[in-house]
């Protein structure tokens, strides 16, 4: 990680590969590209990347399958690329270990921001042992069960804390409704998005400066939520 | 009626007729002349021939001749004849009887034939009338099977018709539910259409025979079936052709509208990019930013357009089924506003959608698309600098009302109802860009959610309103846990 971070891009569209390679190279990344799923898996095994950008529609393998097979041996963050209206595929990829997603067409600033967040998140989870998560004026001490906003303690119910702690522990990652519900309420509640909606509303009221424009607990339309942590 | 058909019975009847005639004439023997008796004996011969046919007629003629000779020509009770004139009388009687028999028989036969032909014609007429306008092969086969049943009275009949070349076969069997008899059918008639064999009518008849009239009728029925099937096929082909023609017209309308719509942003992008990369002009920072903004804006516009095209084709294919789950309307509105940011740049926005509204069971992405289309429409048709309002409220426990209001010029009443139709454009197509798809998609999506959408003129603009049910499968969201 001291030298240039290595990014593997798996996408079957040569134009996308060309653009992403040009831009990422200019931004001091080392870029490897693959246009097929099998090729991507082989390359990933040969030179383990620090981050993988994976298109969900590949000619040979299902992108979700590639995601699953990568997660069998690597924890390198995976950012999924897909088109709009394929929410099911995105959710499936996230539930199988992808960290984030981007909808085509995307702005390059957006991609760079996601790459930065993902790399930071993976570096932090490697150094582990981190129990305090910060986002702006918010500080969450996962070990002490304490949440403070500008130094003032925020009172949360047990479920609210459990939910916030789960999101904060996976800061930067997109968590699907399903995954959050299963982790916080239990697998039998996985389909009851309404609980999540209600508790997210409560949490935002307690934590966000402007609950109508959340900056800490952001919504991923049709997919889930994300906790935006500071670096 | 049926007994009279048995030959022995008919013969017996002719005997009875002659015996009765003899019985009636016998008491008159002393009073009338043999010539008169001969004439009177012609009566039963004529009647029997007319009533029972030629065979019994001949029998009656011979029997009458013998009875006449035996009872009325001297010497009585003997077949011998003494006088020459009586011999002549007897011979003349015999000749007249036979000739009468022939004439009456011929008349009778032609009458029978005429009746039979009439019956055939009636049957065929009935069949033609019943098949008129029927294009369903199953219905055709049933009608025909019934007609064959009436015509031929078979023990069992089976009808097989090929629906289309290489396709399925329709079967009809009568009596219904009976198992087909073992063995080969007694009679099978092919149904020959203009493009080859279409099927077969198979009959099982225990006495094994059909009259020539029945045979003829069956042939004609087979012809009618072929005709009906051909007609059905033509009707089907015609309606298919019509559907194709319509969808073709729709496609070319779409193509022309879309290619125009796609080219406009592409032209802007191309022009901006070539200006920036040309190197002939030194652009100052602001001009560069303008050009770059135009590129970004038009790319977003293209993306929005492609989304609408996809939704429209899904709507057409009936595959735009919402993935409903409990959502917060305020979040959907926020997502739509974020996506339409650049298109809304020149308008003021007033949003009144509370986070505390009840949850709505909707497909987030689809309702976001509805809002995006309504916003895009409002931005396009209302002057820059005017306000666009978005409001949502729940009325009662069953419906949420969402409205997007703008300050565009009012619409004519007839346009209000039609702006949700596909390709319907109020303004001349070259003045404001658009495919005429956006609002039709809104309607498709809202209705797929079980809601309604409509537009109203207001004092200073136009309101789009839509409703969404608050119940999912008839139920509200699960009750909140109390902590």
Image (spheres, rainbow, N blue to C red):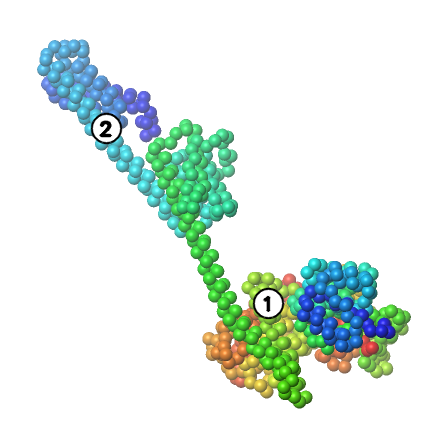
Query: In which quadrant of the rendered image does the C terminus of chain A lie?
Result: bottom right
Task: Identify the mark nearer the N-term, 1 or 2.
Answer: 2
Q: CA distance from mark 1 to mark 2?
A: 83 Å
Q: Position of residue A79 (x, y in %)?
A: 75, 68
- Please give the name of the residue rendered at 50% of the width and 75% of the height, measured from the top-left corner: B425
Confirm whether residue B438 shows in the render.
yes
The N terminus of chain A appears in which quarter of the rendering? bottom right
Kindly state the secondary structure of the residue where label 2 is placed.
Answer: helix
Is B11 placed above or below B360 here?
A: above
Mark sitting on residue A43: none
Q: Nearer the viewer, residue A162 or B395?
A: A162
Which corner quadrant of the image does residue B473 belong to?
A: bottom right
Q: Is residue A195 left or right of residue A125?
A: left
- The x, y position of residue A186, in whole percent, is 79, 62
Residue farthest to the front, as pictured: B280
Identified at 79% across, 71% down, the residue is: A30
> In the depicted view, which residue is nearer to us: B380 or A46?
A46
Q: How many marks?
A: 2
Query: Nearer the observer, disc 1 or disc 2?
Result: 1
Query: Can you identify the residue that label 1 sits on?
Result: B310
Q: Are marks 1 and 2 on the same chain?
A: yes
Q: Chain of mark 1?
A: B
Image-based side of B456 in relation to B109, left or right: right
Q: Secondary structure at mark 1?
A: helix
Q: State whether residue B52 is above or below residue A185.
A: above
Residue placed most toward the observer, B95 or B164: B164
Query: Which disc number belongs to residue B105?
Result: 2
Measuring 10% from the left and 13% from the top, which residue is drawn there?
B84
Residue A198 percent coordinates (x, y)? 73, 71
Q: Chain of mark 2?
A: B
Residue at image location 60% in from the left, 78% down from the top? B270
């Amino acid at each position: 990680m001291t030298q240039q971070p290595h990014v593997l891009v798996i996408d079957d569209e040569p134009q996308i590969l060309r653009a992403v390679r040009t831009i990422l190279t200019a931004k001091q990344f080392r870029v490897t590209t693959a246009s097929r799923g099998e090729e991507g898996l082989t390359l990933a095994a040969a030179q383990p990347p620090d981050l993988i950008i994976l298109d969900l529609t590949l000619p040979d393998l299902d992108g979700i399958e590639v995601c699953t097979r990568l997660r069998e041996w690597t924890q390198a963050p995976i950012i999924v690329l897909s088109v709009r209206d394929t929410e099911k595929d995105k959710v499936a990829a996230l539930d199988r270990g992808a960290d984030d997603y981007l909808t085509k067409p995307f702005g390059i600033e957006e991609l760079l921001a996601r790459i930065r967040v993902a790399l930071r998140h993976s570096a932090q989870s490697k150094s582990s042992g981190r129990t305090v998560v910060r986002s702006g004026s918010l500080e969450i001490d996962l070990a002490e069960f304490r949440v403070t906003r500008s130094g003032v303690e925020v009172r949360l119910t047990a479920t609210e804390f459990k939910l916030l702690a789960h999101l904060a522990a996976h800061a930067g990652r997109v968590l699907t409704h399903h995954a959050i519900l299963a982790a916080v309420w239990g697998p039998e509640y996985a389909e009851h998005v309404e609980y999540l909606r209600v508790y997210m509303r409560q949490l935002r009221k307690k934590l966000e400066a402007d609950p109508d424009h959340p900056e800490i607990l952001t919504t991923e339309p049709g997919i889930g939520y994300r906790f935006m942590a500071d670096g | 009626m049926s007994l009279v058909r048995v030959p022995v019975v008919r013969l017996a009847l002719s005997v009875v007729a002659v015996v009765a005639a003899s019985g009636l004439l016998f008491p008159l023997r002393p009073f009338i002349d043999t010539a008169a008796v001969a004439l009177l004996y012609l009566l039963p011969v004529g009647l029997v021939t007319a009533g029972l046919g030629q065979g019994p007629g001949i029998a009656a003629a011979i029997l009458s001749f013998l009875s006449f000779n035996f009872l009325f020509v001297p010497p009585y009770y003997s077949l011998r004849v003494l006088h020459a004139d009586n011999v002549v009388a007897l011979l003349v009687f015999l000749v007249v009887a036979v000739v009468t028999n022939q004439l009456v028989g011929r008349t009778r036969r032609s009458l029978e034939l005429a009746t039979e032909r009439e019956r055939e014609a009636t049957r065929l007429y009935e069949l033609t009338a019943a098949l008129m306008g029927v294009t369903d092969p199953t219905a055709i086969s049933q009608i025909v099977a019934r007609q064959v049943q009436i015509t031929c009275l078979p023990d069992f009949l089976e009808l097989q018709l090929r629906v289309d070349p290489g396709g399925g076969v329709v079967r009809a069997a009568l009596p219904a539910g009976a198992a087909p008899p073992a063995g080969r059918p007694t009679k099978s008639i092919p149904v020959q259409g203009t493009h080859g064999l279409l099927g077969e009518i198979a009959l099982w008849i225990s006495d094994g025979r059909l009259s020539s009239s029945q045979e003829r009728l069956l042939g004609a029925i087979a012809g009618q079936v072929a005709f009906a099937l051909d007609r059905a096929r033509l009707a089907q082909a015609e309606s298919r052709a019509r559907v194709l023609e319509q969808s073709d017209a729709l496609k070319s309308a779409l193509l022309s509208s879309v290619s125009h719509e796609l080219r406009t942003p592409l032209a802007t992008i191309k022009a901006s990019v070539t200006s920036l990369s040309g190197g002939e002009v030194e652009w100052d920072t602001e001009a560069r930013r303008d050009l770059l903004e135009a590129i970004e804006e038009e790319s977003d516009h293209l993306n929005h357009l492609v989304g609408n095209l996809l939704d429209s084709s899904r709507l057409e294919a009936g595959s735009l089924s919402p993935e409903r789950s409990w959502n917060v309307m305020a979040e959907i509105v926020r997502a739509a506003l974020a996506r339409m940011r650049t298109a809304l740049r020149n308008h003021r926005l007033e949003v009144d959608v509370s986070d505390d509204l009840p949850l709505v069971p909707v497909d987030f992405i689809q309702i976001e698309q509805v809002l995006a289309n309504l916003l895009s429409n409002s931005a396009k048709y209302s002057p820059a600098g005017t306000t666009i309002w978005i409001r949502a409220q729940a009325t009662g426990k069953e419906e949420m009302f969402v409205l997007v209001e703008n300050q565009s010029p009012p619409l004519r009443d007839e346009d209000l109802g039609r702006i949700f139709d596909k390709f319907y454009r109020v303004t001349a197509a070259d003045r404001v860009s658009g495919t005429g798809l956006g609002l039709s998609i809104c309607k498709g999506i809202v209705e797929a959610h079980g809601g309604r959408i409509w537009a109203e003129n207001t004092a200073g603009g136009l309101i789009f309103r839509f409703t969404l049910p608050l119940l999912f499968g008839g139920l509200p969201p699960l009750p909140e846990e109390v902590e």
